[in-house]
Amino acid sequence: MSIIDDQGQPKVTFNKDVLFDRHIDELIGICKMAASDGVITQDESEYLLKWMKDHEKYANEFPINILYKRLSEMLEDDVLDAEEQVELLELILQMTGEKKPDTVANGSTDLPIDRPEPEIIIAGSSFVFTGVFTIGTRKVCEEITVDLGGEMHKGVKRATDYLVIGDIGSDHWVHSSFGRKIEKAVTLRDVKDTGLRIISEHHWIKYT
């Protein structure tokens, strides 16, 4: 079999896994550059989504599948809002293994999850979601909760019944952008005894 094509150039073939690895490296590089200043802009998010659409044959491959699904949902309305920017940055940092600029590792990172994990009553209860979730964007989690009769709060307050923490990267909550919600929830639960419960995503999923 000839190794020269019709133009007299050598035929070059690549193993599928090698090509995939190269594309992953390219995507990781793009993500690192976008996240280097600690902010993912609208233009950067649109460029990332375009790159993944241009490489759609890898859309079901990890980790592209997670980022592609989330970003498609976030930009469904053509706008990356402030909370989505935070969530996207958290997801990208987890995917690339990078740290936020100017962060220092100190203090405990153990999540203040209720132990034992409580029974969850969704209908008639109020929820706040924070962090990055394995099953979809924060909006998706909120929609599931509302469909089951739950109520959403934009932020943690006295009337909040449950704070649900996403499973992705949750062990680094102290240094994350959603750490303040968790800290406020701990105060309401432990100091002011409001009855608020702090639960993990995987525990909440059991009741959906």
Image (cartoon, helix red, strand yellow):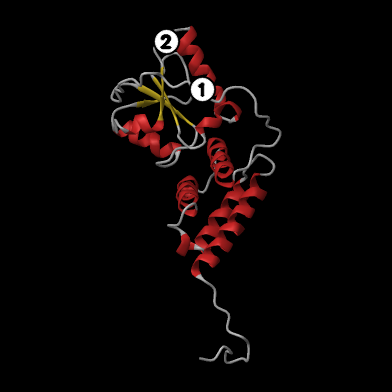
Using the rendered view, name the quadrant where residue 21 is placed.
bottom right
Picture quadrant where residue 27 is located: bottom right
Horizontal side of residue 101 vs 200, given as left or right: right
Left or right, 149 with respect to 107, comes to: left
Q: Work out whether residue 114 or residue 80 is closer to the camera in this orientation and state it.
A: 114
Could you tell me which residue is drawn at 62 percent across and 44 percent down? 40
Q: In percent of the image, x 56 and y 23: which residue is there? A: 180
Q: Is residue 208 above or below residue 117?
A: below
Pointer 1 residue = 182
The residue type indicated by label 2 comes to Thr
Q: Secondary structure at mark 2?
A: loop
Instruction: Tell me residue 140's x, y (percent).
Output: 40, 39
Check disc 1 and report its element: helix, strand or loop. Answer: helix
Label 1 crowd bin: few (<14), some (14–19), many (20+), radius 10 Å: many
Looking at the image, residue 45 lies above or below residue 144:
below
**Local crowd at mark 2 within 10 Å, few (<14), some, or many (≥20)?**
some
Residue at horizontal 39 percent and vertical 18 percent from the top: 115
Residue that lies at the very extreme toward the right in this rendered image: 102
Position of the C terminus by quadrant = top left
* Residue situated furthest top in the rendering: 192
* Mark pair 1, 2: CA separation: 14 Å
Sequence order check, earlier mark of 1 and 2: 1
Badge 1 amino acid:
Ile
Residue with the most extreme front position: 1
Residue nearest the observer in this picture, 109 or 178 = 109
x and y, in percent, of residue 153 in the image: 43, 24
Could you say where residue 22 lies in the image, as x and y percent from the top left? 58, 63
**Where residue 25 appears, x then y in whole percent?**
60, 57
Q: Which residue is mark 2?
A: 194
